[in-house]
Image: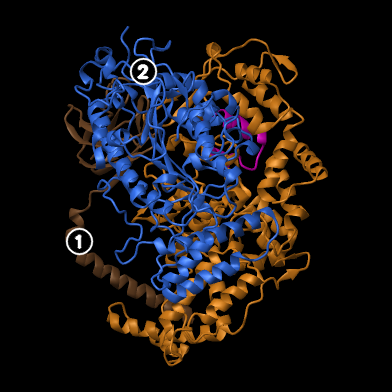
Chain colours: A orange, B brown, C blue
Amino acid sequence: MSAVGVAETAQSVVADEPVAEVARRRRTRRAARRRHGRQKAHRRPRQGSVGSPGWNEAHVRRLFWRAGFGATPVEARRWAKRGKAATLDFVVNGPPGGAKLRGPEPRVDGRTLDPLNEWGDNVLWWLDRMVRTTYPLQEKLTLFWHDHFATSEQETPLMLAQNRMLRRRALGSFRDLLGDVTRDPAMQLFLSLAGSTKDAPNENFARELMELFTLGTGYSERDVREAARALTGFTADWHDNGTVTIQYEADEHDDGVKTLLGRRGRFAINDVLDLVTAHPNHAPFLVNKLWSFFVATPPSRATVRALAATYRAGGLRVKPLVRAILEHPQLYRNLDEPDLVKCPVVYVAGALRTTGSHISQNYPTWLLETMGQYPFYPPSVAGWDWGPAWMSSNSMRQRFTLGNYVVNYGRPRVRRGSAPATLTAQEAYDLAWRAVAEPQVSSATRAALVHLAAHFFDDLDPDWRDKADWRGEALQATLRHLLLVCPDSQLH
Amino acid sequence: MVVWRRTVLAGGVLAALLLAAVFAARPADARRSLPTTSVGVGAREYRLTAYRTSVPRGTVRFNLANYGEDRHDLVVRTRGGRELARTAEVRAGKRATLQVRLGPGTYRLICDLADHEVRGMHTTLRVTR
Amino acid sequence: MPRSIHKGCDDFRQTSAGARERWLGGGMTRRQALMGALGGGLTIWANQAMPWARVLEAASAQAADAPAARVLVSVFLPGGCDLLDTLPPIGAYGQYADLRGGMKLEAPPALGATGLGIHPSLAEGLNGGVKGLFEAGKIGFMPGIDYANPDLSHFHSRHFWETGLVTERAAPGWLGRWLDHHGSRDNPLQGLSLSSTLSPVLATASAPVAALESPNDVGLDIWGIGGQQERQMRAAWARMSGARVRGDGPEAVHTAAQLAKSVGDRLAPYAEHDDVDPLAPPVAYPEEDDLGRRLSRVAALVAQPLGVRLASVEANGDFDTHDSQPTELADSLRSVSQSLAAFQADLEARGVADRVLTLVWSEFGRRPEGNESSGTDHGAGGIAWVQGTHAASGILTEYPSLTALDRDDNLKVTVDFRKVYASLIEGWLGTDAAEVIPNAGAYGRLALTR
């Protein structure tokens, strides 16, 4: 039956038509699609054919992976055509009107997510944001700040509130972000700033403020002590529903004169934060940290100087600095040999997002834990160890396992009848490659998988091959799985 | 044009199926209409917090997490002190779930190990109609 | 002055205001946070069709490490195990009874002529349990073990014992550090953590290690793919992960991918399939006992040509007996005794007992005086022991006095755990302790093996 014939019949259907008739029509339409699909398969897609040498799909993919959670093939082609400046504007500024979550809210175990009250839903909730947001850079930077201002083992209401604050402040003024972090209940409890009084000042936050959050080096033990004095006076007020308000009690505050980073005064919280951000070590410290989040190879001294100047000239705003990094040619080196290891969160969120899949089950929670990056639980205030440190035979096995879930429950699942065993090895590979959003793989990987496809039916009697669709489908599942989890896909 | 017609088809059939489903399921549905509501509970020395202060009547699922160093548990009591349900003892860093049907009223959630309740490990949950 | 019931944990809470969060904070720079490789995972896959001869060939070819290499097993009793009830000082029973009142052990069996008794639960299990092992000369007890000015927080203390450093900084485990110096670059099975995530004792900076709960629930598996197709799939994986790449990231990825597969290949012959368990123990372990199960895996894997050198196991019981110590500790020690007795018998039956030494430890001791809940709070001067056919036997350290307590009314520490670590590294593993334990020379040595 031709495609037109099907449509004509459709016209005359009424609501209470027998189900069997509907099913028959569905089967015929499927058969027509299958034939059409086979014809399409012969045209091997060429990646990177859109755009110009200075800005093409490869650049877009690199940018979208580093600044977010990957690009779909449609996105890669669209932004290759629009050019570098327009793409960067879009990536850095996000859509006009602010970030939105596209598509339906996830349902897991037959219910909507309840990040506050159900274990693991907080992680799924955040992962879902990464998958559905129209402003991926914002989520990516929220992740960066969560690692930078690492807070762990605090109760869920507090961590969710902190997460929302980090998102709000992610691309704005660093000084404002620092102020909110210092006053954040989860952070204050974690580093014992709440309850630090003039009689018993706690140095924990003061030390991490300088060592981990703003300077790295360039301060003394005395500075830590004096900053601790200046930060006294905060207390935590618990509410019935588990939220906490940070109060300031002036008579618990040490209002004496402090000497901090070479200055003297009756310093309090704002003075401390002003001083550390004005310190000459701050800009290069943050520049290096942000750079290493986006780029695998270290920046030259000149690059650091230039970026620090940009950061300062922008009034310590994060966005101009991030934009400068995302524009930098070093980010686009070795476009055909990605060199930055995807952290577990980016790997999982990216696999779902690029393939058009959704959060529908809770496997990401325990998978992320066994991969070594469970959100809201960094191993210490120093955050996670990035890059090669993500890799071990254990974490690699867990990353391999993700493929099962995406291929069986996500958009790349193999539809019955969509992959007959009679496809050639190259056709089978191309079909699989398209189904998992055309990931960037090396020619060695491609060759290994085409070879696998070619020999997958070796043990089948050739006469039975055209009745062995189930084997063709198994090959598709295998190819899609391997494309999602292969070593090339662990890098971006 | 072809596409539009296909959409009409889909809508029509879908409506039919839904209608049929509703008719078939109604009596059973009425019986199961009370919701299950989840309540996160955090335990630490010496504080017990429920992340919801009130829930609708029905099944309440308490998800207890021990953020402290000592062992804790969760006991659900009526306002009058009668015990309705309890978790086992939960070690530091571990979790436990407790499901219980609650009618409207006020309930007391406590940790009943040693002197934890006296030291602050108690809170109230209101169950509304 | 009335003592509150959980004073130990109160102390922790108070010291923690600075200490705990300071520690959690760690004051760590990225470079210093050497948690390094999270550890390998054993990728075990059931492969029904592989000819055994070929597999064993491959396996023994892989076992380049000396087959007679010594093995050290760490068994951790979480929570702080009470010395006084584990080895009740029956020679000073009156003092013990005064301290413990109604919760005291009534008639603990005597431990030879040592002047000490032993908890009745430790007599349970094969061949008289842990007590039987002691009487057979296979256990050396170390009462009074801890470190000076002990931190009574589970969190801190455990961290110190795991890293062999009394420091708040993050660091690899002491056994992980040993592997960084003396381990191989490509055998994750050299350090086995019998758990789903790597035990901090075995966390390394660079050497590969493995975390495994059971040989059967890990693997490079694709659902629905088996037999020849699975073999082809894994061959494709080997090809992809063998590609030449440049850069730290790509190299790390490809190495991890290769290790994941090679470990799977090497353990394939030992995977459970069709209700046949190639690692089935030759002796009876306690039923449904996690510690027993983990130890049986250790014994089985040590006995194969896999190059296992170190293993880390955590007991399930809770030794943090703030209340109801008589029943809690009895249950926890029963599991320990039955499991360790079976473990030793297993090693002997498999013919590998001569090269395995086990260290049993906990993160601190408990207060000599009982509290109002029939329990004890965190204290100092705990109990540890070495076990094995080459373990030095007897009571190897001085039992702390029950009357001359420290200024917190805790038992005095009579041996620093770092002395024990240094002694094991030199006496059993045969390498320089200073590589692993800073300032190792300052601790002196104990003869822990013979």
Question: On residue A413, which mark appears?
Answer: none
Residue type at tag 1: Arg
Q: Which residue is mark 2?
A: C7
User: Closer to the camera, A173 or C212?
Assistant: C212
- Image x and y of residue A3, in percent: 47, 88
Q: C243 or C111: which is nearer to us?
A: C111
Q: Nearer the viewer, mark 2 or mark 1?
A: 2
**Taken as a whole, is the magenta stretch helix, strand or loop?**
helix
Identify whether C246 is placed above or below A23: above
Disc 2 marks a residue whose amino acid type is: Lys
Residue C42 visible in the shown view: yes
Is A460 left, or right, of C248 in this rendering? left
Instruction: Tell me if residue A177 is in the magenta stretch.
Output: yes
Figure quadrant of residue C133: top left
Q: Quadrant of the C terminus of chain A?
A: bottom right
Q: Nearer the viewer, residue C351 or B39?
A: C351
Let me know if marks 2 and 1 both belong to one chain.
Answer: no
Pointer 1 residue: B26
